[in-house]
Image (cartoon, rainbow, N blue to C red):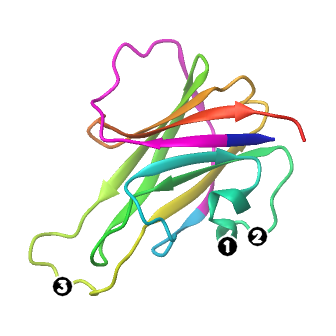
Amino acid sequence: MFAAALFAGCASSTSGVSNTQSVPFTDHGTTQQSGNDGGARITVATDPGPIGLAQLAPAALGGRVYIGVFAGTQRTGGYSVKVDRIERSGDSLVVHAAFSTPAPGALTIQVITSPAQLVSIDQQTASGVHSAVLLDQSGAERARATVTQSRS
């Protein structure tokens, strides 16, 4: 089983990434109410339950590794996160996502939201992965997770 120790951050962009391979992924959907009370984060597990997004994939598929991408707590509606692509570089997964905000002056629902998306990749593709990095559309690092592999 894969488990993730989470470290969210607002660090600078990554550079010098070479030998990257595109990783196909399955989109399991998004939510505006993920329950994430913090900032942007990324989680990786073999089951969507520990990620906190089991409502998006109620029947976990075997042979898949689930990746939860969280935009963080927002004061209104109109925010979203959408995974554009996933790449593998050595022992790291690099998840590229677009973070959207409402336009200035836009009418938005006045409720706390916590946008998130759940995607999954083939478990063999994730073999040997030790970290996952979440980059926004500008290439800035939004979050990072250390991925530990354990057997149950």
Based on the displayed image, in which of its 4 quarters is residue 55 positioned?
Answer: bottom right
Q: Is residue 85 magenta?
A: no
Left or right for 73, reference 33: left
Query: Which amino acid is tagged 1?
Result: Gln
On residue 107, the disc is: 3
Q: How many angstroms separate mark 2 from mark 1 (CA)?
A: 5 Å
Position of 95 relative to 12 (above/below): below
- Numbered range of the magenta stretch: 4-28
Q: How many angstroms separate mark 1 from mark 3 (CA)?
A: 28 Å
- Rendered location of residue 151, percent (x, y): 87, 36
- Rendered location of residue 77, percent (x, y): 31, 78
Left or right for 50, reference 37: right
Position of 89 relative to 122 (above/below): above
Residue at the spot of label 2: 58
Label 1 neighbourhood size at 10 Å, few (<14), some (14-19), many (20+)? some
Left or right for 122, reference 78: right
Q: Are marks 1 and 3 in contact (CB under 8 Å)?
A: no
- Rendered location of residue 83, percent (x, y): 47, 50
Q: Is residue 6 magenta?
A: yes
On residue 55, the disc is: 1
Query: Which amino acid is tagged 2?
Result: Pro
Q: Residue at x 27, y 30 (%)?
A: 12
